Image: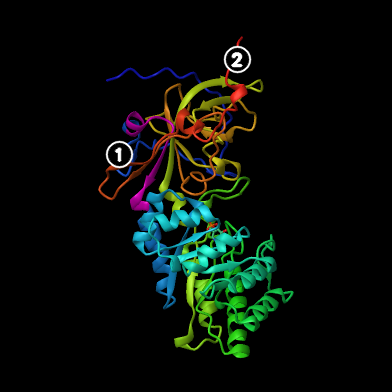
Amino acid sequence: MTKLRYERPVIKTLNKGVSNKFGAQQGFIPHTHIDGLSVKELTKEYGSPLFVLSERTIRETYRQAKTAFTTRYPNVQFAWSYKTNYMNAVCNVFHQEGSWAEVVSIFEYEKAMRNGVPGDKIIFNGPDKTENDHRIAIENGSPIHIDHLDELYSLIELSEKVDKRPRVAIRINLDTGVPPMWDRFGFNYESGKAWDAINKIMHTDKMDLIGLHCHIGTFMLAAHAYKVAASKLADLALSIKKTFGHDIQYIDMGGGFASKNTLKGAYLSGSDISPTFDDYAENICTALLNAGFKTEELPLLILESGRSLIDDAGYLLGSVLANKRLSDGRRATILDFGVNLLFTSFWYEHIISPAQECSQYAEDAVLYGPLCMNIDVVRESVKLPPLNKGDQVVVHRVGAYNMTQWMQFIALRPKITMIDMEGKSHLVRDSEDLDYLMLPERMPEHLKDFEL
Ligand SMILES: *Cc1c(COP(=O)(O)O)cnc(C)c1O
């Protein structure tokens, strides 16, 4: 038997009762394995910090979401939101499952092309598309989602110069009754701007209006907001049918479904309050089915969910660099990853578990990253058992927006692995090194030499 490590005693007030306003006090369950692979072995093989993706969780989550919709609506298509996580391995898992691609920039567009997604299955969103970007999308038959009138006018101009008719949809913003209203993207529904844009497109007859799109927000905890949005888009589709005799091919409800993460300052944990895929599907599908379409004219329902499909499949493994006491007596633990890798720690209270056996005594701690920068805080206040230098931790639900929004500041980016369905790990992105970092740098001749 190994000798137990000494732990200094902690004196704390006892609260009577089972739970306080932060919910029930939980015991600490070490998270030692991911999909059957040991955390310690993974970091030994790939280094620390390390991002780990579970292919099994991605596929299972996707299938749950898909079933929620296909059991309620006859014609459903998912399109993977590249900006949420555009590691090619991740994208291809979604493409293997049948997802199209949804991109918001030309480089994401080209990534999808290189992954082998057919052009007509790449949805091109976003306010930033150049004439050349439009040209490429038109040539490939990709659905172009128009964001503003300037984009519409430049497409009309371009349509004279190309042989193919652009396939377009318009992005619509609308009031769902749930603040904040995202009105900076697309054309507004209530003020009639969306209908103006539709008329402009239909009367110019220079392009095919194939769809209507909205993306009402992100981390939407109110599932009924989607019901309002779907009804408004359906209403527009039916007006187009009535006025122009034209059938819209699809209604694209965007993304924004909440994952099970807990937002900062939230009273209850995300796993308790985030709506399920069934909740979202029920709202959207019911609204579309009740709108008044004939069965054979029901538009294809497209969904661009990002975070809710990938958050649970991502883990960040890291190590404790040091402990110290702050001047107010709180314990501070310094980890080898910070906001550079965990961008989402700015808005989530990520669950962090010890990766080894630990004591059940917990203490309030601040978790800092390794950056020499004051804002590098992973958790402002978290109850954790004492962690020692060299101990490891597992951060949960980091699959969305970290592997794309990470920043190369002070530290280089680490490796990413994916554990396959058989429990075997694969390197899917190598760590960066100095050569990689300096690749685009150029040194002017007169600055090459110096003497000190
Ligand atoms: C970001 C984005 C998504 C994905 O959003 P999630 O909140 O991650 O589901 C989908 N569609 C558009 C247009 C987006 O900008």
Please state which amino acid type lies under the numbered disc 2: Phe
* Secondary structure under the numbered disc 1 in the rendered image: strand
* Residue 62 coordinates in the image, percent (x, y): 40, 60
Residue in view at x 55 percent, y 38 percent: 407
Name, please, the residue furthest toward the top: 452
- Asked if disc 1 is less than 8 Å from ligand 1, the answer is no
Depth order, front residue of 429/72: 429
- Which residue is drawn at the image coordinates 60% and 76% (left, top)? 233
**N-terminal of the two: label 2 or label 1?**
1
10 Å neighbourhood of mark 1: few (<14), some, or many (≥20)?
Answer: some
The stretch of residues the image draws in magenta is 42-57
265 relative position to 31: left or right: right
Circle 2 SS class: loop
State the image quarter where residue 203 is shown. bottom right
Q: Nearer the viewer, residue 302 or 231?
A: 302
Which quadrant of the rendered structure holds the C terminus? Answer: top right
313 relative to 362 in the view: left or right = left
- Residue 176 visible within the image: no
Task: Please check the rendered image and state whether residue 47 is part of the magenta-colored stretch, yes or no.
Answer: yes
Q: Is residue 31 above or below residue 178?
A: above
Residue 181: x %, y % from top left: 69, 63
Q: Quadrant of residue 329?
A: top right
Name which residue lies at 54% across and 44% down: 405
Q: Name which residue lies at 47% across and 55% down.
A: 110
Q: Position of residue 430 (x, y in %)?
A: 39, 37
In the picture of the structure, the residue carrying the numbered disc 1 is 37
State the quadrant of the N terminus. top left
Look at the numbered discs 2 and 1 and tell me whether their residues touch, using CB distance below 8 Å.
no
Task: Say whether residue 356 is magenta.
Answer: no
- Which residue is identified by label 2? 450
Furthest residue to the left? 422
